[in-house]
Amino acid sequence: MNDLSPTNTVSTIEELEAIYGEPLPQSLVKEIDYISDHYRSFIEKSPFMVLASVAEEGLDCSPRGDPAGFVRVVDEKTVMIPDRRGNNRIDTLRNIVRDPRVSLLFLVPGVGETLRINGRAEISVDPELCASFDMNGNTPRSVIIVTADRVYFQCQKALARSRLWDPDAQVERKELPTAGKILQSLSRDEFDGEAYDRNYPERLKKTIY
């Protein structure tokens, strides 16, 4: 393997384009500035989405999940995302307040293609709007409203290479450290990781919404 020295790094767009060449025509055709009926179907079938945001303090990439259709398509330019209960770090919301640029990545179980929306977000705390996203009697404290600037699908290559939906590729949870063990280690044993792991299933039931 070659040593990755400064002489081997890429620092200009011209260098990148010389290495990779022109984009495939279909990779440009698929990008539009609105949510088409085809793209809407991906959003409405997706129970999982990743939301990326940016601000001067740095970047954030946050998973979002709910029953399929939890991201509401309002019209060809707008989607709404309920901000469900979390750990109150609100990294994504902090970023949106400072810089509205966001990127969404939608996954549909069993489907190789993914869908991306790049756009601008704002946070609404309108009571009626929040109440319209009620789940099991629990209302989100805010709703993220995204205006789409660029919408396009990604081909199957990444998910095919990763075998993400292949049952034989699934990793048993016991092969990785538990959340409790990680927290206990990072807190230098000031945190009871065993109790955390033991109580988490019941806590999840009570706090998921």
Image: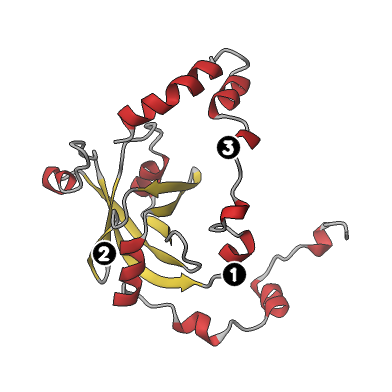
| Vertical comparison of 3 with 173: above or below | below
Q: Residue at x 34, y 76 (%)?
A: 38
Please state the horizontal and vertical placement of residue 42, each as a whole percent of the image: 36, 67
Q: Residue at x 29, y 76 (%)?
A: 37
Numbered disc 3: secondary structure: helix
Please state the horizontal and vertical placement of residue 162, each as a whole percent of the image: 62, 59
Please state the horizontal and vertical placement of residue 36, each as a whole percent of the image: 31, 76
Depth check: 157 or 32 in front?
157
Q: Residues within 10 Å of mark 3 (few under 14, many from 20)?
A: few
Numbered disc 2: secondary structure: strand
Give the number of the disc on residue 157.
1
Depth check: 33 or 75 in front?
75
| Vertical comparison of 113 with 139: above or below | below
- In this rendering, would 164 be left or right of 62? right
Residue on which disc 2 sits: 78
Depth check: 22 or 57 in front?
22
Amino acid type at circle 3 is Arg
In the displayed orientation, state which residue is furthest to the front.
Answer: 168
Give the number of the disc on residue 195.
none
- In this rendering, would 9 be left or right of 83? right
Residue on which disc 3 sits: 173
Please state the horizontal and vertical placement of residue 106, each as a whole percent of the image: 42, 60
